[in-house]
């Protein structure tokens, strides 16, 4: 298999990176005969060899290394690797339409011979995102609103949010939940459903705006209640501290403060309009 080496910008850039990360690409930096098996070479290998196993595995990397080692010339290993990288970057590209018509390896490519180049390499199956139903509660009076801070670890760690519950609550359940926060609802209305996609999960949200006459005077002063670790984390912010003892790490803030001080995650964006001053 004859492979010519390119010497364009890509090569210069690669050599520089090899010099700055000594040992990663000894073929080019030091002329050693070692295939530089990266994503590009794995793809080229899978197609040239019609490798039909999953490509992101140690076994696939080992097979690719053996495959290229067998074909690597003694005298110009760096050029060989560079030619394959260039081929992978410009011709044997990811996706379903590599440029086989322009490929100098077309005659020795097993995948192209059976018209299956676009099917390879075999990538790991994508994990389906989990679906999580949540109910978002926008609990407010004329100029104040209930917020809470998320736990310090995990999804949206440490960010502020509207109180929300797992599952889809009915109106009655949402009203009961508001009462658990010490709030007496005057009016409840359903808001738009919304969906937010994270990397590994989706929130499917149902929202309610719950209007109350006013927050209880002593809402934030009940220091006999257990203050959770998360609530402790708000120390330093007097406003939050004052209300840190509310159930569920909630605290009351003004609509004005919400708009100036608390950046809520975009996952809740559809509910932002319901925090406007009345
Ligand atoms: S012939 Fe097509 S699939 Fe085979 S190495 Fe060349 S570009 Fe890739």
Image (cartoon, helix red, strand yellow):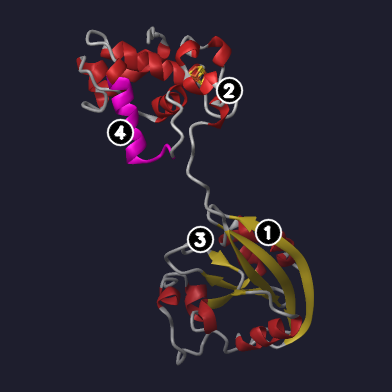
Q: Which residue is mark 2?
A: 115
- In the picture, residue 44 is in which quadrant? top left
Q: Which residue is mark 1?
A: 195
Question: Are there few (<14), some (14-19), or many (20+) residues within 10 Å of tag 2?
Answer: few
- Spatial separation of the CA atoms under disc 3 and disc 4: 39 Å
Q: Is residue 56 magenta?
A: yes
| Of marks 3 and 2, the one in the foreground | 2
> Residue tagged by mark 4?
62
Q: Secondary structure at mark 3?
A: loop
Helix or strand or loop: what does disc 1 sit on? strand
Residue situated in front as seen by the camera: 150 or 98: 98
Classify mark 2: helix, strand or loop: loop
Q: Nearer the viewer, mark 4 or mark 1?
A: 4
Place residue 144 in its image quadrant: bottom right
Sequence-earlier tag: 3 or 1: 3
Camera-nearest label, 3 or 1 = 1
Q: Earlier in the sequence, mark 4 or mark 1?
A: 4
Question: Going from the N terminus, do you reach mark 2 or mark 1 first?
Answer: 2
The label on residue 156 is 3
Residue 278 appears in view: no
């Amino acid at each position: 298999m004859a492979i010519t080496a390119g010497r364009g910008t890509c090569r210069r850039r690669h050599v520089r990176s090899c010099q700055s990360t000594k040992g990663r690409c000894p073929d080019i930096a030091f002329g050693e005969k070692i295939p530089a098996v990266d994503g590009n070479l794995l793809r080229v290998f899978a197609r040239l060899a019609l490798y039909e196993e999953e490509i992101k595995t140690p076994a696939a990397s080992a097979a690719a290394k053996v495959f290229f080692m067998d074909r690597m010339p003694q005298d110009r290993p760096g050029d060989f690797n560079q030619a394959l990288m260039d081929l992978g970057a410009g011709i044997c590209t990811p996706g379903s339409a590599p440029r086989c018509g322009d490929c100098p390896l077309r005659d020795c490519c097993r995948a192209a011979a059976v018209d299956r180049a676009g099917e390879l390499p075999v990538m790991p199956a994508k994990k389906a995102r989990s679906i999580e139903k949540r109910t978002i509660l926008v609990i407010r009076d004329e100029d104040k609103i209930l917020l809470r801070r998320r736990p310090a670890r995990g999804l949206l760690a440490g960010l502020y949010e509207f109180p929300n519950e797992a599952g889809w609550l009915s109106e009655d359940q949402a009203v009961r939940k508001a009462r658990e926060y010490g709030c007496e609802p005057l009016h409840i209305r359903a808001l738009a459903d919304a969906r937010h996609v994270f990397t590994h999960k989706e929130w499917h949200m149902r929202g309610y705006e719950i209007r109350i006459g006013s927050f209880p005077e002593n809402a934030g002063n009940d220091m006999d209640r257990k203050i959770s670790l998360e609530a402790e984390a708000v120390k330093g912010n007097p406003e939050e501290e004052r209300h840190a003892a509310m159930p569920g790490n909630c605290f009351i803030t003004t609509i004005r403060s919400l708009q100036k001080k608390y950046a809520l995650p975009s996952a809740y964006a559809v509910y932002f309009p319901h925090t406007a001053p009345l």
